[in-house]
Every structure is written in C-alpha cells, then in structure tokens.
Amino acid sequence: MIRQKIVAGNWKMNGSTESITALVTDLLKAGHSNSEVVVSPSFPYLHLVSTLCAQSDLIKLAAQNVSDKESGAFTGEVSASMLEDFGVKYVLVGHSERRSLYGETDDLVALKIQSLLNKDFTPMFCIGETLEEREAGQTLAVCERQIQAVLSLLGVEAFNRIVIAYEPVWAIGTGLSATSEQAQEVHCGIRAFIAKSSDLVAQRVQILYGGSVKASTSRALFAMPDIDGALVGGASLDAKEFLEIVKAAG
Ligand code: PEP
C-alpha cells in the first residue's frame, strides 16, 4: 500500500513573531512537495502561521498539545474546539516531553486523542521507549502498551484517523538518532501489533520516525518500507535543513 509521507516540524517552545515569520516565509518559497509538510508552532503563534500560510496549500498546521476537556475551569489549557478556529489539522499528543515533564499518562493521552477525534483533527500520537527500557529489551512492549491504551478506549478503527510518531526518548534532542535499521524494526513491530486487530488499518496507518532527524540521516530513514516520514524537532527551526528533509521524503 502507498502511504503519503509526512514531514512535520515540532518547534517546541521556540520562536518569536519575527523569527517565525522569517522561517515560514522561507518554507513557502520551496514550492510544491509530494509529501505533507507540517509545522507546529506554540499556541500564541498559530494565528500568525495560519495567516502566513493562508494563500497556499503547501504547509499544514499542527498544535503541540490539547486538553482532554471541552471547556470550563481549566486554567492554562486549550481545548480542541478552540483549535478549530485556527485552521489546525494535526495535534501532537503524548510527546515524551509531555509524558516525562508534565506527567501525562497513557490513559490521559488516549482521552486527548478521543477529544481530537470527536472533532475533525488528526492526532500525531507519539510513542517510544526510554534508553533504560530499550536496554532491558522492552522497546516493543512499551510501544504496545502505549498503543493499547488508545485501542482499549477507541478501538482499532480510530487508527484510520491517527498518525503514529515513533520517537525513542533517548534520541530526542540528543543528536543520537536511531539507525534506519533500528527504526524500521520498531515500525514493523508497531504495524504488526496493529495488524493483530486489523490488517487493513495496519497497512494504512502512517508511522513517522522522530529523534534527532537531520537532512543527512533522513534519506536512509525514508528508504525503509515502514517509515512514512519524520517528526523533526531541532532541525525544523532551520528552513534550509528542514527543506532538505522534505526533499529527501520525495
Ligand atoms: C521532537 O521533539 O519530536 C524531536 C524529534 O526532536 P529532535 O528532532 O530535536 O530530536
């Protein structure tokens, strides 16, 4: 099955009106790509990026987080219906920084995905093991546990509307990318796990790799049969580097 590649930039808590305007302007100069190109600014810049991209279909917008609640007394939170006002298509959920720094559990991540699927968003569902878990041979078991929380709440058909991002925690922001073979092995295992519930859904679901992806490593990653693109942190803040990754995706 042909799955469209996605190259998504996670800008994390970086940028200003000036730097984001310059970055988006440079990205828009690149023109058409066969891959889906996505950027995720912090909440205060969603409107700016949405406005900058309004005249073109080249870049899709992602938010970095969402509340599992619809509205009410939840100071500091942002709901899915609020994101509807900003032309957001994708929303990151379960990023390892949210899990480790803000205590997000598998169950909360599943509830956030539910709130997004109740609207018309595509969750980018981040999963992945720590170095300790990898060294203990737990890599797939951890990914399966994280996926199972969503399967139990929402069923396998939900994965027709979810993009998975496999991001080994030890590779995020460390410069230590998984090799393309290591990543492929896990992507293949994730697909096989979903196939136990539905072969068709497993064949369709896009699985991105994330963790210190650079232009120099992206081509080998994208050549792997089960790697359908990348979620890129640091390198997505540099237009030239990010566009090289987009080019490598074809
Ligand atoms: C990320 O934050 O999702 C990420 C993959 O970061 P980096 O590319 O910087 O490792």
Image: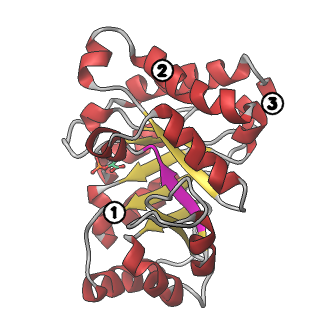
Q: Quadrant of the N terminus?
A: top right
What number of labels is visible? 3
Where does label 1 land, which residue? Answer: 236
* Left or right of 200 in this view: 39: left
Q: Which residue is mark 3?
A: 200
Q: Earlier in the sequence, mark 1 or mark 3?
A: 3
Q: Would you say residue 233 sits in the magenta stretch?
A: no
Mark 1 vs ligand 1: CB below 8 Å:
yes
Q: Are marks 1 and 3 in contact (CB under 8 Å)?
A: no
Q: Residue furthest left?
A: 174
Q: Quick check: 146 above or below 77?
A: above
- Which residue is at the front of the view, 67 or 35? 67
Quarter of the view holding residue 175: top left
Query: Who's the residue at 61% across and 77% down the image?
Result: 87
Q: Point out residue 235 in the picture as x, y percentages from the top left corner.
A: 29, 58
Tell which of 235 and 104 is nearer to you. Answer: 104
Secondary structure of residue under mark 1 = helix
| Residue at which label 2 appears | 185
How packed mark 1 is, by other alpha carbons closer than 10 Å (few <14, some 14-19, many 20 or more), is: many
Task: Find residue 44 and report its horizontal and vertical position in percent.
Answer: 38, 79
Q: Within 10 Å of the Cα at label 3, are there few (<14), some (14-19), or many (20+) other Cα atoms?
A: few
**Image: 235 above or below 230:** below
- Magenta range is 89-94
Towards the viewer: 169 or 27: 169
Amino acid type indicated by mark 3? Leu
Q: Secondary structure at mark 3?
A: helix
Residue 136 locus on image (x, y percent): 29, 8
Q: Is residue 157 above or below residue 148?
A: below
Instruction: Give the CA separation, mark 3 to mark 2.
Output: 20 Å
User: Real-space Cα distance between discs 1 and 2?
Assistant: 25 Å
Q: Is mark 3 within 8 Å of ligand 1?
A: no
